[in-house]
Image (tube, rainbow, N blue to C red):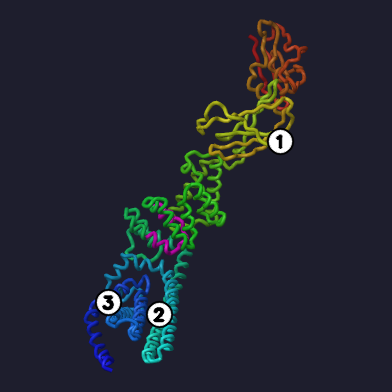
Amino acid sequence: MTRTGDSGAAAPSLIRASLSRTGKWAGSVAFIGGAASDILNPLAPFAAYIALVASVAAAVIAIAIVLRLVLAAKALPALIFATSAAAVAGGVYGLQQQSNSQNGVIAGLVPAIAQLQQQMGIVSARVARIEQTVTETKLAVDQVKQSTDAVAKKTEEIASTQQQQAEQGAQTQKSVEAVKQTTETLAAGQQKQAEQADKLQATTEQIAASIDTIAKGFAALAAQGGTIAEPKRPDEFYHNARVYELSGDMLNARRSYLAFAGFDVDAVDPYTRFATLLRVQDGKAGAREVFGALADKAKALSIKLVHILQFDDAQRLDKLNAFIAANPDFAPAYYLLAQEFSEDRLGVQSLSDKRSEAEALTRFVSYEKEGGLLKYFVDQTQLADWLDRSRTRLTALGDVLDPARFAPTLTPMRSNAGWTISISLPEAATGISWRMGVSGPFTDTGLMAMNDQRTGKPMPNPSFELPDSTTATTIGVKYLDLRGRETGPFDISFDPDAALQQGNKQILDQFWTSWIAFDASGNHGLVYFSQMLSFRCGIKEVRYSLNGTALDKEIKLPPCDKKDPYAIPYDYQPYFKVADNVTSMAVQVTYTDGTKSPVREYKRQ
């Protein structure tokens, strides 16, 4: 009895002593924490979190003291601090709910605090993080409920095992009920905040869907110049980003670009410009990291597309092709694909590179007629620049999309031994191969003992041989371009008879001055026509006349010998006699293809 009485008398003095030692700093810390949570309220309802956690802590400590699980002298300072924190934070949270101020009570009363929030990026970060905050808050509520259930369960166990402490157990139960009520109040507040977040998200999506409205706002702001003091709309953040960037204030430009990205606007030009700024400041790896984080959260395809551009070479091209395959009507992707094959990017282009560039640019420009480009650009001057570059490059590329530009040609040359087939390619090659027919293995022509200055590699042999017994067939040709990419095969028809006739015609046309020779080698009175005789396989008829152009005579040529086409038969006379009064001769050749040569005149010397 004496010890119980002493304990009862000592309790008030112990509490007073604890209050004297702990009250001052506990109250000060609680007040500072409440003020800080109020200033940071745009990021999350920290006052509510502190009040909840402090209340639960106070209840648990009180239970422990009542059940004598800990010494009161040691636990009272903690109980006083938890109670002070719960009271101050709960009061702050109550004032916030009563004033309905999302930026905090102090920010509403003191403009300087609101301005500080703006400078620190707290308020502007709210829009981007509100959805994440709601999710985390719901998770915290669930965890608090689980903690509350655990406390209740523990309380019931204590009440059943310690019947003599029923009064203390009842008091504990009341504390638990108070915690539950606080939790329910907090959950209701978070539900209200979630509804506000949903409304804000809907507003953001509506803004993102109206690129035209944003573009008009951006154009108007650009005409005014200067920065917007308190930007709220995406066009205002983009405008500020451009102004800061052009003035060299890269830190604020970066912040403004990030704020714009928070609206998830599906426009290409803000993100390509932001990526350029990041590559200058952080390198390609830094830009890739920033856009990777944005792409993980964003729905806008423009952000995902610009993220792809931060990868290197082959990996970038593969990802870009995959993006286009998944989004075939996303017009800006074709312009960016064209850059992968451009002369600026590669230095030296193969025909395949030029064709790929032209195809992508043609596809991009085609969307202009359909009105499918404006919706991807906030700054219309950027779109105009892309279109101007596209048209200039297409003009420079010319008819590169014509399939004939990619087809090699064959020039057969007949000799008494057989055929020499020369291959003409439309571009520099590092290897050439051929085959007879439309199937079967290819044969490499080999390399020459010289380098091609266009490729810096040994020049491939541009010809191959065929026997004189070759009949009409198809010759397949393929080659490796300067990047080692295979082009072809191309199937080219080869008709030996037509090739022989065409080759003879070409030589006769080129060297027509040698058709006729008067008094050759001192043989006065003789007219020689040896050249026409050698290339007779291309001739159908030869008409001539002397001292005029009547063409009333014919030179009868022997038949073409396909086995030995250039040989003159031993029993044929390659000349005829003329009188001394003949001073000129006119000749016209009709070729095997039906065409006729001009009338050629030859003067006797």
Q: Dot 2: what SS?
A: helix
Residue 567 x %, y %: 72, 17
Residue identified by numbered label 3: 31
Figure check: 44 above or below 528: below
N-terminal-most mark, 1 or 3: 3
Main SS, magenta region, reads helix
The alpha-carbon separation of the residues under discs 2 and 1 comes to 83 Å
Quarter that holds the C terminus? top right
Find out whether the residues at labels 1 and 3 contact each other: C-beta distance under 8 Å: no
* Viewer-side residue, 556 vs 94: 94
Residue identified by numbered label 2: 186
Q: The residue under label 3 is which amino acid type?
A: Phe
Q: Is residue 91 visible?
A: no
Of the residues tagged 2 and 1, which is closer to the observer?
Answer: 2
N-terminal-most mark, 2 or 3: 3
Q: Dot 1: what SS?
A: loop
Span highlighted in magenta in the image: 256-276
User: What mark, if any, has residue 390 been given in the picture?
Assistant: none
In magenta stretch: residue 260: yes
Q: The residue under label 1 is which amino acid type?
A: Gly
Residue identified by numbered label 1: 437
